[in-house]
Image (spheres, rainbow, N blue to C red):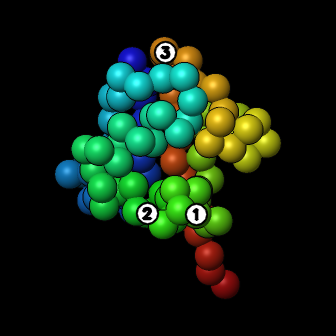
Amino acid sequence: MVTVLLPGPLRGEAGGASRLSVTAAGTLRAVLDEVAAHHPRLSRRIRDERGELRRYVNVFVDGEDCRRSGGLATPVGDEAEVQVLPSVAGG
């Protein structure tokens, strides 16, 4: 089972959960598709209308930045940990 870790700002879109268990594996796209099926509001915070990762959201699969390892095609193993981190801006 894949574990998706959510920071505080995104937990409200997942019923307050800090982690989600996902049965889908194979690719990051498959994992996020399952998340979208159960938490559509959370999905809209992570992916845009075309289904691509939003620019300001960083996603790590087992500690590796997915943008450097294949984007949504990044391989995700059965016991992987996916961490979603929205960028923080400020001055």
- Residue 26, image x, y percentages: 54, 22
Outermost residue, left direction?
A: 15
Mark 2 → mark 3, Cα distance in angstroms? 24 Å
- The vertical placement of 39 against 50, above or below, is above
At horizontal 36% and vertical 37% (from top left) the residue drawn is: 34
Percent from the top left, x then y, of residue 2? Answer: 43, 24
Q: Can you tell which quarter of the image residue 17 is in?
A: top left
Task: Kindly indicate the quadrant of the structure image that contains residue 52.
Answer: bottom right
**Disc 2 + disc 1, Cβ < 8 Å:** yes
Mark 2 or mark 1, earlier in chain:
2
Choose top left, top right, bottom left or bottom right for residue 62.
top right
Residue 48 visible? The answer is yes
The residue under the point 61% across, 33% down is: 61
Residue tagged by mark 3? Answer: 78
Residue lying furthest right:
68
Identify the residue at horizontal 64%, vertical 26% (top origin): 75
Marks 2 and 1 sit apart, C-alpha to C-alpha, by 8 Å
Q: Label 1, label 3: how many angstroms apart (C-alpha)?
A: 25 Å
Secondary structure category for the residue under label 1? loop
Q: Position of residue 64 (x, y in %)?
A: 70, 34
Judged left or right of residue 71, residue 50 is left
> Mark 3 or mark 2, which is nearer the start of the sequence?
2
Q: Which residue is mark 2?
A: 45
Residue type at the position of mark 2: Arg
